[in-house]
Amino acid sequence: MAPPLVDPAFWRDRTVLLTGHTGFKGAWLSLWLQALGARVVGFAGGVPSAPSLYELARVADGLTEVAADIRDLGAVRNAFTRHEPELVIHMAAQPLVRRSFADPRSTYEINVLGTVNVLEAARATPSVRAVVNVTSDKCYANPPGREPRPFVETDPLGGHDPYSSSKACAELVVEAYRWSFPGSVLLASARAGNVIGGGDWGEDRLIPDIMRGALQGEPIAVRNPEAVRPWQHVLNPLSGYLRLAAALHGDAELQGGWNFGPQQDDARPVRWIADRLTELWPDELRWELDEGQHPREAHFLSLDSTKARDGLGWTPTWGLGDALQSIVAWYGALRDGEDMRAATLAQIESFTAATVRDQPASSAG
């Protein structure tokens, strides 16, 4: 049998400090780490939405929680000192482009200074072996008129909006620490974007807006229907983060930036996604064009994940069709009153089984 993409034997009984564990991606990763047998320490300032995957799936039941602000260096240092993590996955962020226009200052404070605080605490904590800093596909410079090709890790960083700029800044911070303090903690950055999945309640995001409309029986307002995005189920990049962290733990050569994007065929227009979800949802569901004023967004974003494929043996497991079906199943289970912790863990188990089935036998362990 092929080895698993994410090896439970590596994660079992290791202490992992996960910042941003109450967010959409953080809650999925928290549950997955719990299922792998890791000792999870979650660090977050609160639950970012109501409802939330974190509360619906009772994520707190299987971890140690530190309720504090990532901008508070003393609180970050205390969490590292008290819990002595071996691995750190830094996901705490202000993750919304539109909110960054309304509050650019806190966006930079959270996304940039929060990263500085994590790295400061990590290099002062002897137990820490490796840190994976999670940013975004939007960290790349994407000026008007740029050739519409997938981004590679060596492309210039940048950003025209505060969110994108803050993520590029966080990448530069990681690189500065990597070169300025060699031999202390191994550092890598993981870049992914437009993740989708059950339990996402983020504001001004396509899938949450559509599924809220589905649950409430209301039409959905869709902006920028022709914009192309690299859609992927949240478990795809999370498997990459776990794969990277485990490999980085034992190999300093793996430091630096890594893209985790879907297959190129899964970069589809917003319109296609909205139409497909209206087909899959068992009840009536329709969308309409939102003709209001909106901040400028890049028309095309796509990542080249060749480096992750060749260097880590990683490939996306669920294609877009699987992702959309799993989303409809998740929100359908919520509508039907099912146990959402069990439903979410069942999807992780199904994804894990698919990674074992689909991985070539020669993949790195």
Image (cartoon, rainbow, N blue to C red):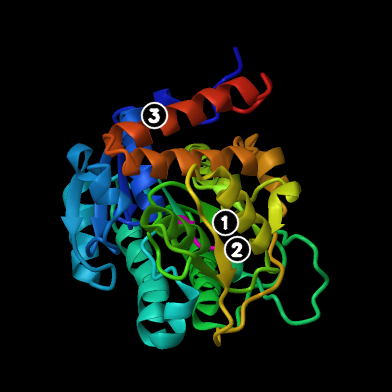
Query: Distance from label 3 to label 2 (Cα)?
Result: 28 Å
Tell me: 13 left or right of 354.
left
Residue 40 can be seen, yes or no: yes
Element type where label 3 sits in the image: helix
**2 and 1 marks in contact (CB < 8 Å):** yes
Nearest the camera: 90 or 193? 193
Element type where label 2 sits in the image: helix
Which quadrant, please, contains the N terminus?
top right
Amino acid marked by disc 1: Ala
Tell me what residue is drawn at x 60 percent, y 79 percent: 159
Q: Position of residue 207 (x, y in %)?
A: 50, 57
Q: Is residue 23 above or below residue 232?
A: below
Q: Which residues are magenta?
A: 133-137
Q: Can you identify the residue that label 1 sits on?
A: 192
Q: Can you identify the residue that label 3 sits on?
A: 346
Nearest the camera: 77 or 358? 358
Amino acid marked by disc 3: Ala
Q: Can you identify the residue that label 2 sits on?
A: 137
Q: Nearer the viewer, mark 3 or mark 2?
A: 3
**Crowdedness of circle 3 by 10 Å Cα count: few (<14), some, many (20+)?**
few
Q: Earlier in the sequence, mark 1 or mark 3?
A: 1
**Crowdedness of circle 2 by 10 Å Cα count: few (<14), some, many (20+)?**
many
In the rendered image, residue 136 lying in the magenta stretch gets the answer: yes
